[in-house]
Image: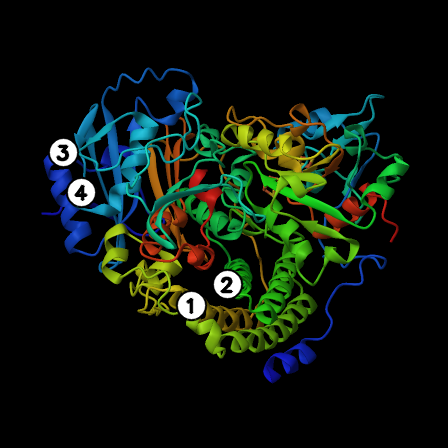
Amino acid sequence: MSPFLTLKNGGSCSMSALPQCGMDEFRSASLQAVNQEQCRVSAFFALGNNCPQNTQKGECTKEVEKSLLVEILLDPQQKCLRVLSTEVCEKYPSLTAEAPAFHWFERELFEETGILPEGHPWLKPIRFADKNREPGVTDYFTMEGEAVHEVAVGPVHAGVIEPGHFRFQCMGEDVFSLEIELGYQHRGIEKMLVGGPDVRTTHILETAAGDTSVAAMLNYCGILEALCQIEVPARGVALRRIALELERIANHIGDLGALAGDVAFLPTSSFCGRIRGDFLNMTARLCGNRFGRGLVVPGGVRYELDKAGAEELLKKVQVGEKELQEALSLMFDEPTVLDRFENTGVVSTETARQIGLVGVAGRASGLAVDCRGDLSENGFVPAVEQGGDVLSRALVRRRELEASLAEVKGLLESLRGGESRSTAVLPTALPNDTLCVHLTEAWRGEICHVAITDGQGRFRRVKIVDPSFHNWFGLAMALRNQQISDFPICNKSFNLSYCGHDL
Amino acid sequence: MFDALSARLSQGYRTGAFPPAQPNLPEHFAGRPVVSKDVDVESLQPICPTGALCRDCAGASAIDTGKCIFCGKCAEVCKGISFKKEYRMGAMHREALLATDAEYHPEEQLDRGIARLYGKSFKIRQVSAGGCAACELDFNVLNTLAWDMGRFGIQAVASPRHADAILVTGPVSDNMLLALKKTYEAMPKPCLVIASGTCAISGGIYATSPQVNAPLDGILPVDLYVPGCPPHPAVLLEALLRLIAIRK
Ligand code: SF4
Ligand code: SF4
């Protein structure tokens, strides 16, 4: 019998109903699910004496007592989430060697709690959250030999972009390995959320990754609405989906334009830069903010869109779509561009599966990972490409753009009257001692929020797993045996979030 | 090539007319607020996520736009607060960010030497230090042909040694403090320091986190504050031009 508890997306369970088993069973069940049953790791973290709320109060002594290791797996076959937990003291046998998708999670766990995943092949911090540790100062993979050299880049990069540190081990132009050290954007968000919900909670979650505000708020509101049994009116649902797709569209356009820029194909780069802005302005038309801040609220959306507004928006989408098609066909019909994209930065399907890639990068490597279809029976068909290269990542975006544009147009055309926001008021406290989990397919990939409340109905823990958390290692893999000069286009083709990872 | 040319023709010349024309601001745009005298800021404080409701030195009710993230929650419940379309929010002095009901005039650049120094070429090194990346994304937008800040001689550069100004976004996370200081030290002096976005000005939504070091003006001498979360591209561009006294 499976030890897991299954939940639907947005499902919750009381902490006392959380299934718990011994470490051996926990390990074998997890490994079987991930390696044989196509489950992917959505969250894996410890809750207990060393969890953030204690460290915040200065109670953390690093002497680990018993903590609860909580795991959430996404099961695309059963279209549900699986939850399991086990007790752990100061160490346990690592899962990474047998299921590399746990690699980053175990590093995070060790950094946050000091619980040692014994036998982890490369245990170093991912965020350098400890004030006593200098960021980026740690062991790195090195190579020896006469023609070998190391290239270190960042934290401050050449462009206007977030900080991170990249170390390449090269022989001439060829990269043998790339290691990525992050954490420069760490603001301690998860600790700030403890004790909520309060006046700051939505704003903190909206800015966890500032280019994914709408998806993050949809996800968080999904949790609140599930916990408080609030029904969002149909019009609110439609307006939210419009905003979510506009966010996807703007970002995908920006990424394709940036790819064009990196191979010096200026027409598409300039057109896309401007068209992306036009779509951000459409989001601003909905709520005044180009990133959709403040639009999604528990129970629905905060701003109304009148009939004239919807028509105006529809026209803008149609114009934008036409201009975009022209800008994109220029690039995708250009042999010199395709030549640079094809077979560059390949992540094979097998590697992608093992390391647990999600979202655009996962789909470009032949994995049908998309929680829009993986968590409900809606017949959703994800855009999957097989190449695993820069071209595939570009093509996935292009196909998703088409689908999202069609969706937004359809939603705008069929927008009905009625309420956009439920009149139900949020209770001041949430249900006590409850775990609730929600995933949303944002433009980069799936965001997972796990909220656990305490005896007073306040947040004891809010675990955020940004899609970039799963995918940074994929970028490192993509660079193996590539020319270092291909780093910019490989990087852009992933376009991962630093702050979403660093939180 | 012909396809590219015909695409160029059909896409047309698309750089906005701002400036000198007024920028196209969205309907719900929240610019500098007006706070009437009778607003009881103390009673509203619990609903503000960043503690931006305050009083100025004369005791008048105010919103500190250096702390405000323009969420509009206060204006929803209080008639005395209204967010206007005023986008000229950048200021060279921190006090000027306090919005009351007094008539507002954007600060002028008083240093006449500045226009001579930077008038036709102003190079900016941007550093992200914490934050959510939206501030740098909307700075990047000034480079697209919709805003084209290059037409005023403003350009983002890679090396701090080539930079006339450093534009900092984010609340200066612990892990970026050293890199930020090193970048500043590498710049030729004199140079200007720009705090762009609520995070850099005051820490914004993260101000209470023990892992951030905002305000930026406690670390570097700030010459320009640009409010917003993130500042709209029009807000930022207008403030930059005013800082270096470029007449539009
Ligand atoms: S709009 Fe500004 S002052 Fe008003 S509640 Fe929001 S952050 Fe506070
Ligand atoms: S000011 Fe707002 S938009 Fe800018 S970095 Fe901070 S949270 Fe993000």
Circles 1 and 3, Cβ within 8 Å, touching? The answer is no
Q: Residue A465: name its quadrant.
A: top left
In the rendered structure, find residue A341 and report the number of the disc placed on it.
Answer: 1
Q: Is B242 drawn above or below residue A363 in the view shown?
A: above
The reply to whether callout 4 and callout 1 are in contact (CB within 8 Å) is no
Image position of B158 (left or right of A93): right
Q: Secondary structure at mark 4?
A: loop
Q: Chain of mark 2?
A: A
- What type is the residue that disc 1 sits on? Phe
Q: Earlier in the sequence, mark 1 or mark 3?
A: 3
Q: Are marks 1 and 2 in contact (CB under 8 Å)?
A: yes
The 10 Å Cα crowd at callout 4, few under 14, some 14 to 19, many 20 or more, is: few
Q: Amino acid at mark 2?
A: Leu
Q: Position of residue A179 (x, y in %)?
A: 35, 43
Residue B40 relative to residue A370: left or right:
right
Please provide percent x and percent y for residue A29.
14, 44
Say which amino acid is labelled 4.
Answer: Ala
Q: B184 or A303, which is in the foreground?
A: B184
- The residue depicted at 65 percent of the width and 71 percent of the height is A316
- Circle 1: is it few (<14), some (14-19), or many (20+) Cα within 10 Å? many
Which residue position is annotated with label 2? A259
Secondary element under disc 2, as helix, strand or loop, is: helix
> Can marks 4 and 1 be said to lie on one chain?
yes
Which residue is under mark 4?
A97
Q: Position of residue A370 (x, y in %)?
A: 35, 60
Label 1 – label 2 distance at C-alpha: 9 Å
Work out whether disc 1 and disc 2 sit on a shared chain. Answer: yes
- Residue depth check, mark 1 versus mark 3: number of the one nearer the observer: 1
Write down the residue under mark 3. A23
Question: Is disc 2 on the same chain as disc 4?
Answer: yes
The chain carrying label 4 is A
* Eye-nearest disc, 4 or 1: 1
